[in-house]
Amino acid sequence: MTQHATLNPSAGASRRAVLQLATLVAAGAGLSGCGFRLRGSQAFSFQRIAIVPNPGGAVAQELRSSFGKGVQVLAAEDDLKSAQLVLTLTDERRERSVVGVNVSGQVREFQLRLRVRLSLRTGQGKEISANDDLIQRRDISYNETAALAKEAEEVLLYRDMQTDIVQQILRRLATIQPAQLD
């Protein structure tokens, strides 16, 4: 007479759970080993910044509200000497150009652009960077029967480009070394 081994269904489930856990641990170790890290808040080497002109355009206003508790944003023009860093935002322009038309000459696609020119200097006047242009572009289709909806979409795209430019500026500011501020 032959004996049959009885299968324990809970043993298979527990083995599967252990394999899944081992797979998750290996994936986590692989991601941390490659340098992957979620983007957190920026660490800046300065505590006081002046953003001119005041109040400035939409980018300058959003940038002022983007700094955390560790950085004081100075508002008055006479505070420029006490600022460790002076950020000048000039030439903020919103542009729209036609990039596609149909056979009857009606517009089918626009390209939206947001341009900002920035300069960085210390409160004592030492220039860190001058006249850097930041440009964001987005393409948007157009249909004259949905003109109001496309206008609302255009506003949202400009707001998205503005947020992207502010994030680029914050990342640039985070790369400034303390030695550059002396």
Image: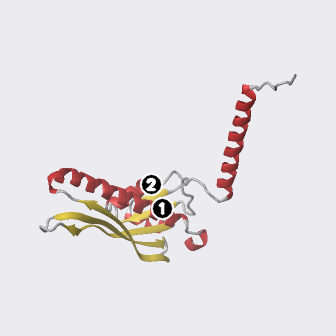
Mark 1 lies on residue: 170
What's the distance in space between the residues labelled 2 and 1, CA to CA?
8 Å
* Left or right of residue 61: residue 176: right
Are there few (<14), some (14-19), or many (20+) residues within 10 Å of tag 1? some
Q: Quadrant of the N terminus?
A: top right
Instruction: Using the image as rendered, state which of residue 51 and residue 38 is in the foreground.
Output: 38
Q: Is residue 167 above or below residue 1?
A: below
Residue that protrudes farthest toward the front in the picture: 1
Q: Residue at x 18, y 51 (%)?
A: 148
Q: Is residue 67 above or below residue 169?
A: above
Colour convention: secondary structure
Q: Position of residue 77 (x, y in %)?
A: 38, 65
Q: Position of residue 62 (x, y in %)?
A: 38, 56
Q: Position of residue 159 (x, y in %)?
A: 33, 56
Q: Residue at x 42, y 53 (%)?
A: 65
Instruction: Using the image as rendered, state which of residue 155 and residue 132 is in the foreground.
Output: 155
Q: Earlier in the sequence, mark 2 or mark 1?
A: 2
Please, what secondary structure does the residue beneath circle 1 have?
helix
Q: Residue at x 30, y 63 (%)?
A: 139
Mark 2 lies on residue: 66
Amino acid beneath label 1: Leu
Q: Is residue 82 above or below residue 6?
A: below
Q: Position of residue 37 (x, y in %)?
A: 60, 55
Amino acid beneath label 2: Ser
- Label 2–label 1 contact, CB within 8 A: yes
Please, what secondary structure does the residue beneath circle 2 have?
helix
